[in-house]
Amino acid sequence: MTFESMWAAIEPLGRDAGTGGYRRYAWTACDHELREWFGQECRARGLDLTTDRMGNQWAWWGDPDAAVAAGDPGIVIGSHLDSVPDGGAFDGPLGVVSALAAADALRAQGFQPARPIGVVNFVDEEGARFGVACAGSRVITGALDADRARGLTDADGVTMAEAMRRAGRDPAALGPDAEALRRIGAFIELHVEQGRGLVDLGQPIAVATDIWPHGRWRLDFPGTANHAGTTRLEDRHDAMLGYAEAVLTARSAAARHGCVATIGKVTVRPGGVNAIASHVTGWLDARGPVEAAVRGTVEDIARVAAGHGATLTEESWTPTTAFDAALSDRLSKLLGEHVPRLGTGAGHDAGILATAGIPTAMLFVRNPTGVSHSPEEFAERDDCHAGVAALARAVRELAG
Ligand SMILES: [Zn+2]
């Protein structure tokens, strides 16, 4: 079971023949296949496989509860196996396959861990089906309320509770899981980089510093429906015009503040080609390395929108998520000071665990395309092996 053979085993699962992208959604048949594959890999290595109250899979080398009792809980590595719609092969699976390969490397070295080592497969990280990202880690940490999670629906109106039931799980069990969390002394998630940071620096591996502050806002623009042919321009109240200016302002304000801002979703009422828009709702996603700059970007957009009578509603806000400084420093020292430290604008289960107070760090592997959440996402095999080696060194240090 080499990195190559594991990669080859999962490569065809959930890949759409037309787009070449992956459609690996939580609690579907494809998800089941991936979970079965993970279970088989763990059993083949003699690891003890458990699932928590949400259904996240944990495989242990050593006794995690004995370690908790001794006050020295385990070292956990891993990531997720699900994808966004038409996602790439590496976002998530690279972390899971690398974790198993790192455990194999340690075995081959004859390493005997003093602390147990866990490999985790988080369920529903992308939120592609039910709309909430990192649902697996959010539920067990209590960041996502169990009733709210059970009631989330997919595009076909199937609730998460029903989807779990169909997948053979008991949705009543879903909820915070202190027992599962207690077992994690430290968590390291290896992930493909979702940008061009390492390409520009000419380095294969980075240690993460933090997850950028980010949020989502809803912009509602009022208008008056009327005939597109018979209404004079000066008599119109077209909700689209304010919306259009907000989209352009999002771009210019983000550039001014050193952030990124995106309006990627919009609904228009009544939505007729020959009707002036009576209402437009746009959703804004804004992120950046500095909280004040993200706030400044959103304020600039809100001011322009208000000039068109629009309202701005904050739907979510997540401040900077800093990874554990001592743990990250230790990784940097271990891997060499030439290894860059990078922040990221993407969310991860590692961020949810860090927010829950668990010492957490991340390693990024170079992505030559810089593209993610797309079939273009890539990592050279040599860089993948460098990632496995870095992860194995980290675990050897922490669990030795
Ligand atoms: Zn991911």
Image (cartoon, helix red, strand yellow):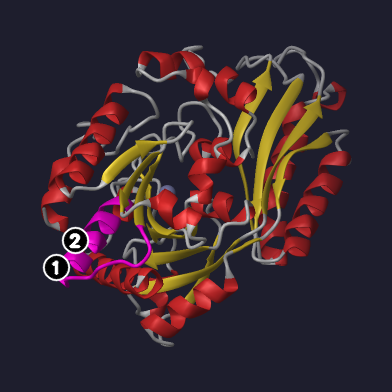
Q: Is residue 305 magenta?
A: no
Question: As displayed, is residue 165 above or below residue 25?
Answer: above
Q: Quadrant of residue 4?
A: bottom left
Q: Is residue 108 magenta?
A: yes
Using the rendered view, name the quadrant where residue 366 is placed: bottom left
> From where the camera sits, is residue 351 visible?
yes
Q: Residue at x 78, y 26 (%)?
A: 238
Residue range of the region highlighted in magenta in the rendering: 96-116
> Is residue 56 shown above or below 268?
below
Residue visible at 20% across and 31% down in the picture: 17
Task: Answer left or right for 229 relative to 352.
Answer: right
Q: Closer to the camera, 80 or 56?
A: 56
Residue at image position (40%, 71%) is: 398
Percent position of residue 90, x then y: 31, 51
The residue identified by callout 1 is 108
The quarter of the image holding the C terminus is: bottom left
Amino acid type indicated by mark 2: Asp
Quick one: which residue is furthest to the bottom in this view? 337
Q: Position of residue 91 (x, y in %)?
A: 36, 50
Q: Which residue is mark 2?
A: 104
Which residue is at a point 62% across and 34% down the rendered structure image? 144
Circle 1 residues within 10 Å: few <14, some 14–19, many ≥20: few
Give the structural element (helix, strand or loop) at label 2.
Answer: helix
Indicate the amino acid at tag 1. Ala
Give the camera-side residue of 221 and 387.
Answer: 387
Q: Which mark is residue 252?
A: none
Q: Which type of secondary structure does the marked residue at label 1 adopt? A: helix
The answer to whether the residue labelled 1 contacts the one labelled 2, judged by CB atoms less than 8 Å apart, is yes
Give left or right: position of 211 versus 55.
Answer: right
The x, y position of residue 296, in whole percent, is 80, 59
Q: CA distance from mark 1 to mark 2?
A: 6 Å
